[in-house]
Image: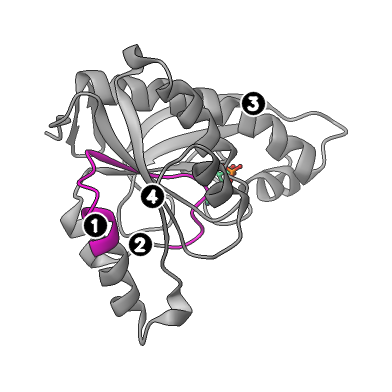
Amino acid sequence: MPTPANNPARLVVLVSGSGTNLQALLDACEDPAYGARVVAVGADRYDVEGLARAERAGIPTFVKQVSQHDSREAWDLALTRAVAGFEPDLVVLAGFMKLVGPDFLTRFEHQVINTHPALSPSFPGMHGPADALDYGVKVTGCTLFVVDPGVDTGQIIAQRVVEVLDDDTGETLHERIKVAERQMLVESVGRMSREGWSVEGRRVRIG
Ligand code: GAR
């Protein structure tokens, strides 16, 4: 059972874009009672707002681009080493738009979590809100899960439901989902950091 070895727990957050989920974690970590702190932020690309948010907060950053490596495997190993150097208790993929590989998942078994803007197992992949809208569902939401080798298929830690409105576009729906997603992420990461967690089969238990 991954119980954080450190108090506060050490978080490494990986981003690819605007980093509003990262920002929610940074804000929560300002309270010592939250039980976690972000020790590094990594990205798979340069010049994203997520990295800028980390830099403004004085947190070390690193970038590992797939294109800078000879193979996907070499990239995965480089990413694994970079993250491992910060000795995280928990690795949070927060809008990280790459699938991490076998080296990463072996090194951080049951310690990598990801947030997805749909109610798993529905609508996996890069376009969760638009796919839900196109399908015509009346409720969708967000899912926090333990990362496994699949696409948004890992064990579910938490979910929040968001209603689909008649005049929603993919963008308006995604923005409302992201509000719920940030709350879900902050609450769950805090509890996992303070209480530990266990994974048995498909079930995740906090505490
Ligand atoms: C979030 O909604 C996250 O769930 C999604 O990207 C957004 C990132 O927002 N991730 C995926 O769709 C991965 N399948 P942020 O950069 O503002 O935190």
Give left or right: position of 60 versus 46.
Answer: left
- For marks 4 and 2, the one nearer the N-term is 2
- Residue 176 at x, y percent in the picture: 70, 30
Q: Nearer the viewer, mark 4 or mark 2?
A: 2
Q: Which residues are magenta?
A: 81-98
- Residue 162's disc is 3
Towards the viewer: 17 or 187: 17
- Distance from disc 3 to disc 2, alpha carbons, whole Å, reads 28 Å
Q: Which residue is found at the position 17% from the left and 58% from the top?
A: 106
- State the image quarter where residue 46 is shown: bottom right
- Distance from disc 2 to disc 1, alpha carbons, whole Å, reads 7 Å
Quick one: label 3, few (<14), some, or many (20+) residues within 10 Å? Answer: many
- Tell me the amino acid under the disc marked 3: Val
- The kind of secondary structure element at disc 1 is helix
Towards the viewer: 90 or 207: 90
- Residue 100's disc is 2
- For marks 1 and 3, the one nearer the N-term is 1
- For marks 2 and 1, the one nearer the N-term is 2
